[in-house]
Image (cartoon, coloured by chain):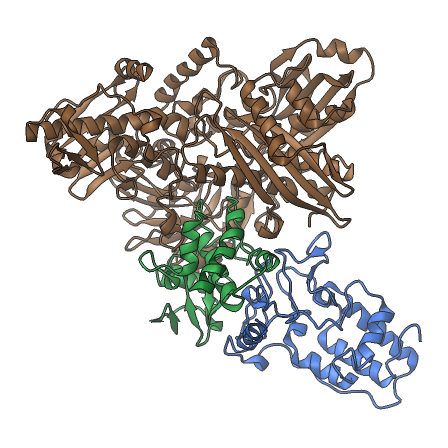
Amino acid sequence: MGRLRTITRRTFLIGSAAIAGGVVFGTYLAKRPIKNPLLTDLQDGEAAITPYVKIDANGVTLITPRADKGQGAYSMQARLIAEELDIDPASAILSPGLPGPAYYNGAVMEESVPFPAYDQSTMAETVRKFMHVPAKLFSMQMTGGSSTVPDGFVKLRMAGAIARETLKEAATLKSGIARDQLKTEDGSVVLPDGSRLAYTDLASTAASIEPITDVELRPKSDWKFLGKPMPRIDMPAKCTGTEQYGIDLVFDGMVHAAVRANPGLGAKVKSYDASVAESMRGVQKVLPINNGVAVIADNTWRAWRAADAVDIQWAAGPYPGTTDEIFSEIEKVVDSDEHRDHRQRDEGDVEAVLEEGEYFEAVYKVPYLAHAPMEPMNAIVKVTDDRCEIWTGTQIPLFVRDHAADLSGLDKDRVFVYVQAMGGSFGHKLEDTHVLQAVEIALAMKGTAVKLVWSREEDMTHDYLRPGAIAKGRGRVADGKVDAFDLSVGQSALMADWFGRLMGMTIPGPDATITTGSWDQPFAIPNYRVTGYRAPTMVPISSWRSVGASGNGFFHDSLLDELIYEAGADPLAERIRLCLDDTSRKVLEKVGEISGWDGPSISENRGRGVAFCLSFGVPAAIVTEVTHNGAGIKIDKVFVVVDVGEVLDPINLEAQVFGGVIFGMAHAMNCETTFENHAAMQDNYHAFEGMRLYQVPEFEVVALSNAKKIRGIGEPGVPPAAPSLGNAIFAATGQRIRELPFNKHIDFL
Amino acid sequence: MQITVNDTSYTIDVEPEMPLLWVLREELGITGPKYGCGIAQCGACTVHVNGYAVRSCQLAIGDLGNSSVKTIEGLGTPDSLHIVQEAWIEHQVAQCGYCQSGQIMQAASLLSTNPDPSDDQIDAAMSGNLCRCGTYPRIRAVVKAAAKKLQGS
Amino acid sequence: MKMSFLRAAFAITSLFSVTVLSAGDKVEINPPLAGSVSKEQGLEAWSRIFEVASHPRCANCHTGPSDRPMWSGPSYGKTRVHGMNIQAGNSRIGAETILCSTCHTNKSEDWSNANVTKHAAPRVAMSWALAPATAHWFGRTTQQICEQLRNPETNGDRDTLEIAEHLNHDLILHWAWAPGGNREPAPYSLQEHVNDILAWGVAGTPCPQD
């Protein structure tokens, strides 16, 4: 705890302000405090203790600024604050709050440093800390990169502790009893005689004093909520249809909008004829918007039908028209010096070793993929002369605010973004095209709330996709061991595309996502090289659950599996032998233990595959067992081991792990987004099926806690899922499938 | 047009081809049933019509006739949970939760006609309900647990 | 448990207020005079009947002992069993697990765009169901289907006139010629198909390998 105290004194500056009847504190990991966004809208009798705690007569509100897309972020953030604040998180009010720079995400930026996660040297750690500065400068309030827990683990508990100690100090002023004689419990300060002062009654007093900043975080042994199975706070609402998602919100006088934007992404509308649509029941207006046409009606279904009835002439999309043409552009860059983006791993002398004689060579391919969350993109926007209000589920509330300000001509502080619960995202809600469309429509309907809901078809044909990629793998084996490993990955640069789109800036230098999940793996191969080649930006691309590692996990582990097979070694034993990181090695050993690993063959038609990927700092190993019965593959059982350093909620962790693995396997089985005439061809779930219940294997999930740092678990289950399935299919059938989705080559039962 | 939803009668004035889903969500403000696909591929809109699961995006309101509709809101409420919902909470099934209304309505319909379904029957009955978060392992477990609970009740 | 299935099967037929006969095309049933159709003409009629029976719009739901409908034909790509693990069961309406009518809802009104939405579950003015196991067409030869159709033990105890009547009344069958949603309709027309059935009957229900 001594170390944490030091950090507290040195880096947490506390700003406090007395508001009528309340108090506000700030905790910030920087020299200059950032404005507490809760101060803006405080009413009489309310206090905002830190940007994460607000108290009024109704109770205590915990601010959970990381978006909940279904991963349980609200419950976890509330629990981190509540652990120190001594309040039942289920009885508190949870609110994502208004977005503000105070809620910047430092941890997510740490991922972009040029050090593999297992490198925790002073140099690597120093650079990671440094990444918090641009996160703050760019107001990076975003949710993603499995960063909610790593970013909030100290920050949120500190917020709870500061609020608690300050409330105790307020109780001291009221009662005359010294602070160290006071305890806190369940939303009250408890005096030595057992009497209680509710936090809600102490807020005004707390406002008048200097906040108590010299606080210690409780040791793990004292945790009441963390580390234990805790029911998710949103569970009853989600099981009774009472959870309110963005798509469910209604306002008086609200109108419903539909859009049809050019399926040639980014291209204009040449002309349109809305005469039929305009005469349809309920239609109020048809108007042009950026790259599309919008219909305003009194009901979403009527708006969609009318939008379908608009006859639109589209300009062609500004990229090659077909998937084959797109992939041939990608193929051109692989191993082309001119297009080399980075080579962050180059050990031994791969080139020399491969020139010595015969070597193994294979080409792998992963498709473009839509996010396709169950809740389609939607937003409600109301614009008046001096205000723009936005209700939407988003992972990037500050970008939404800034872009809406630009579009509406209003100052940023006149744009209010109310973040809604989300029916999934998987990265789709890192984009805001739909919100800006709604702003455009609302500008034409000033004073009226406009609800825009994308149809499923609009959603899946206007996504920012997981980039397709091609990898060439080469390698050599010697004496039953993998001796040389050379992977060249070519794809468009998704982070550069995203930054360019959302921040209007070009990010100089390499785009690490091209090889994230392959260059940074914890193996020691004598000759080991991973190179990223940048294809031009074609169809717009973005982050998809597990980002760069989603494709690279498949490339790296598939090639490794093939080389181990060439060497005649055991797939698990050779991975363990090659592993240079203790934490990762233990994960591999554990997955061998729980799966009863005794080689890739189980019986004549049954086989198992192991795969490993270190992503977002989490080593994850999977053993997948499959049966091939002649008609197709059945996935029988999946064993997963991860190490997140500290398990804060074993129940939710298990759900995130098997959910991530299913997400990875489902898309590997049967999903791809392809293009014809510049348009995405898969416009609904019939063509983008994923996994259905009957295809779901049994799961066994184990989380180890050997790692030194705490990590998030929303994404790390995804990258090793596809290769573990591919390796298992090979073990059961002898058929090595190097192209996703697998169902292009083999059927699934 | 008169329709009955969750034992309440409503008068509506809409096109006969408007899907029940959109009548529920936007004419009546009953938002438990969700829009996911509009083509019977995801099951998020599942409600009960005369006690049986129906994809409300596929049933035109003009075809409802005198049938009664029950949505997740009519199955049970946070203060008075249906046994299936109770089991769902105990098993911590939901992640984003968007498909769960439909999953629960499908499971309740299955268990009302087949109180003791086999694993294969659960996999057959519940495979029309898509979940993108991957809550499936708990769905399989919770339907069995709910069946046991219902038999004990 | 068996009772529950029966209850379900019964309930589903009364699920909606059914005004069956207002929907679908009317068919004229005018069998040719006895002796007016030669065996050759009968076989020609049969070959057209076979084109219809083996067409995906018909064969996909005539899968015999399998209780799994198929997805095949120009609008489906690679031939596969119906997605979502659908099993019609002995009830043929999915009563054991999930009713066909969960998605293939009954439409009781006759508006022209009932099946206009691409990839949605087709709807007709009766309960969607898989054909009886005896009526096994999917993947079978012309001779096999022919023998099944002319045998009262495997065709629902019908003569060809009754088969024609059945075609007239079973509105799922009408759907095959107006499937909507960019699906390819069955060849010829319902009326031509009925005429062929009648002609084939008058010719003595000849099969190609007789």
Question: Which residue is at the far front?
Answer: A193
Query: As displayed, is residue A630 above or below residue A567?
Result: below
Query: As displayed, is residue A193 above or below residue A111?
Result: below
Q: Quadrant of the N terminus of chain A?
A: top left
Chain identity for the colour green used in the image: B
In this picture, residue A412 sits left or right of residue A113? left
- Residue A687: x and y in percent read 62, 49
In this picture, residue A564 sits left or right of residue A131? right
Chain identity for the colour blue used in the image: C
Question: Which shade of the palette goes to chain A?
Answer: brown
For the residue pair A320 and A552, the one nearer the viewer reads as A552
- Residue A611: x and y in percent read 64, 30
For the residue pair A221 and A410, the one nearer the viewer reads as A221
- State the residue at coordinates (52%, 53%): B37
For the residue pair A612 and C154, the one nearer the viewer reads as A612
The quadrant where residue A125 appears: top left
Q: Is residue A306 visible?
A: no
The quadrant where residue A742 appears: top right
- Residue A423: x and y in percent read 44, 46
- Residue A456: x and y in percent read 51, 50
- State the residue at coordinates (44%, 40%): A651
